Structure formats: structure tokens, C-alpha cells
Image (tube, helix red, strand yellow):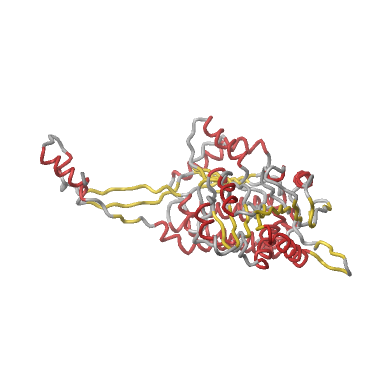
Amino acid sequence: MDRIIELQRNYFKTGATLGYDFRINQLKRLREIIRKYEPEILDAFLKDYNKSAFDVISTEIGYALIELNHLIRRLKKLMKPKRVKTSIINRPSKGYIVPEPYGVALVVAPWNYPFHLSIVPLAAAMAAGNTVVLKLSTNTPAISELLHQILMQYFPEDYIYVTWSSPEEREALFGGRFDYIFYTGSPAVARKLQLRQAQDGRLTPMTLELGGKSPCIVDSDADIDAAARRIVWGKYLNAGQTCVAPDHVYVERSLKDELVSKMIGYIKEFYYHKTGGEYTLREDFTFVVNAKAVERLQSALENTRILWGGKVQERRMEPTIIDMVTEKSPIMQEEIFGPVLPVLAFDDIFALVRNIKSLEKPLAFYFFGKRHAAMMMRECHFGGGCVNDTIMHLTEPSMPFGGVGQSGMGAYHGDKSFETFSHYKSILVKHPRKELKLKYPPHNAFKLRLSKKYLGL
């Protein structure tokens, strides 16, 4: 791996990636590759996840193309140096803020959205003028192998290098001398990455897109039908394997039975066939990633009451709703990351806010209601979220997406993606002769008075 990193660093030093023409052509090439290989991508998702064509198009290919199109459309403006005003002490002068690439970037992609969460940061790094080492997940072999083949076919390895082969290679990557790192995955592995870089004597800038237990609150004045519909969609999209999925629901106690009933109704409508009086899970419901994850989810159901679902057939786990859960229950101690939704009742929304604020800051936060919406958005701290919806905030290119605290650091999407992979250097251009000579010794009372006046002392 050191050979690849050094190869890319040498290529970056030639300046080949810096120009607009090079960057725009590479982004357009990437877009054409995605369009060309759409059938193969759909087939790979069917093999790894049993994922429907609609879900692949809408959450993987489509979103990647939205981000790519945004970068292509905005690239020239994003690359342009920004002129800024300078202060009186530097006149006459000009000030500029100039975006420049970091150099060799490492992008570590997760398994839950293996195409979308590979291509979007890859495209951002390319747009900013970096070379990229892209690490794919071993948990999605069909998708990772396909991405490896097509990207290595169309891009030289000194510009884009793709790997996914082994955990041992991941360890080698974590110790690599990169100029920027973009990691999506678990907090535990993120800490290992940071520790390894520090142990090797590096202070590497990085973006960490992690997760956490993202709560969803349904207040007394919420539209219960809309809340049920949108929570069900957001929770069971990709079989709950979404970092911003509603992890659990808090509902005002008097509305709990109605909300659960309506959620079960939408689960039946969205994900089941009805034959006679029997409901059968649709064949295109997304698989849980592997048998180990299924076992973990089944264990989490112990000592809870299953209100709907809970059955498993190989890697296909039913959309499940549970209650008889408290804050101390095992399932409430870590991110669920699967199609299991605990429902908890609350009586006092202000007590609930205090409880939420005592926990780690989540990646996402959802609130259904009117009267307390502004208060909840102000008082609760989180990466991003929605009022009266779930997940949809991350579909807006104009809104940066990222975590805070244990749910991550840094953000991307839209213009912010380019900014994340760019260093913004400040340049002051002074007149070759003219200047205010106040700074030069010897100093006297007059200079002191002028300085104090300028500083407002």
C-alpha cells in the first residue's frame, strides 16, 4: 500500500489534477461510467442485499448522480479564488482565499450504502483536485468487486486506486501517510483510525461520518397518520441499515396505541402481500447484511414485547415493532442498525428533553408536532434532522450533512463536499512600496494613541 500512496503523491506533485479541464473531464467520465453500468450495479445489489431496483436507483445511483451533477455544474465557481476585503493596517493590498487540494486522500466506505457512500466522497475528492485511495467493504462482495473492476478500468492507479480485499489491508491503510481521510462507519473503528494515525506521528485532517441512536419524537399535536407513514418509511428503508434511520420512537403516552396501530397498518401496506387473512413479507424486502447481524438483532429482541414482526428467514428479517423497553434495556445501549423499532411512551416533554440532552449527541433527530417544534430544534443537539419527516434532510445538496461529538465530525453534500476536500489558503498581496509604517520601531506616544484608537481601547 505504501507503493500506491507514494505513486499517487508523485502524480499529485506533477500538478496534473489541479486544472479545471482535468477535474471536469474526470467527473464527467465518472458520471458516464455510472450510467453505462447501471444494469450491472442493479444486479450486484440484488446479489448482496436483495435490494429492489427502485431502492437502488433512488438511494444509491440516483443520489450519487445528483451530487455528481451538482459538482459538475458548480465546479468552476467553487474553484475560483475569492476576493476579500483587507483592513486599513494593510492598505494598499488585496486579499484572496484560494481553495487547493490536500493531496492524497483516503476514502473508507461502509457496507450499508456501498455505492452511494463510495461514489459521493470519491467525486468530491476528485472535484477538489485530490488523488484518491478508495477502500470498499468486504461485507458486500458483489458490489465491491464491480466497483473495483470498473473504476480501476477507467482510471489509472496513480490517480484512483480501489481496494476491498482484506481486513489486513485496512490496517495497512489506517497507518498510511495520507493528506486527508474521509471515513464512514462505526465510532469504534473511527477511534482505531485516529489512534493509528496518532501513533505513527501524524496529525491527519479527517472527516468522520459515524452514527448513534437517532431519536424520533411524536408529540401530542402531531399528525399521527403522517407521522406513522414517514417513520415506517424512514425506519425500514434498507431494512433499517441507515445511519440516520429513526433508532427508536418516543410518543406522548395517550397517542401510543394509535401510533403503533397506524405504523403496523403502513408496514402491512408497504412491505407485505395479503393472501386471504395472512400477511406475507414481500420478496423484495432488503436483506440484513449478514448472519452475524441477524443474530445480533434477534438477541436484542429478548425481554421485549413484539407488537409486529420479529420473524427471520435466513437474512430476511421482518419489519419489527417492540415495546416493554426502558432506557436501561440492552437494545437501548447501542445503535440498532436493523429493522427493529422500539416504541417508548413519555408524559413530560421537558423531562424528555433533559434526558436526551444527557446522552451522546446523535447523528439525526426527528420531531413530529407543532407547538414544541422550535424548542426541540433549539434545545436538542444533533448532526441534522427534520420536523415532521425522517431522513429527507440529507437529500438536499444545499444542506451539509454530518455528525457532532460521538456521531462524527465534519460534513459534506453539495458545495460542502468540495470544501471538505479542500484547504482554503489565505493570500495577502501588498503593494511593493506603499504601506502604513505604524508597525515599525521606534514606537512613540503618537503611534500608541493611533493603535489604541484603531483597536477601540
For the C terminus, give its image quadrant: top left
Give the percent coordinates (x, y) of residue 143: 69, 53
Residue closest to the eye, 50 or 402: 402
Pick whichever, 297 or 102, lies toward us.
297
Does 264 sit left or right of 8 as displayed? right
Write down the quadrant of residue 176 in the picture: top right
- Residue 296 vs 126, above or below: the answer is above
Q: Position of residue 135 (x, y in %)?
A: 61, 45
Q: Is residue 313 visible?
A: yes
In the rendered structure, the answer to whether residue 78 lies left or right of residue 96 reads right
| Residue at 70% across, 57% down | 238
* Residue depicted at x 75% and y 53%: 322
**Residue at the bottom extreme of this rendering:** 276
Compare residues 125 and 187 and report the one nearer the observer.
187
Asked if 97 appears above or below 228 in the picture, the reply is: above
Q: Position of residue 23 (x, y in %)?
A: 48, 56
Relative to 46, say whether 179 is above or below.
above
Q: What residue is drawn where x is 18% and y is 43%?
A: 452
- Can you say which quadrant of the picture contains the N terminus? top right
Quadrant of res 19: bottom left
The picture places residue 21, in percent across and down from the top left corner, at: 45, 58
The image shows residue 156, relative to residue 286, as above or below, that is: above
Report if residue 25 is visible in the image.
no
For this rendering, which residue is in front, 344 or 7? 344
* Image position of 80 (left or right of 180): left
Q: Residue furthest right?
A: 276
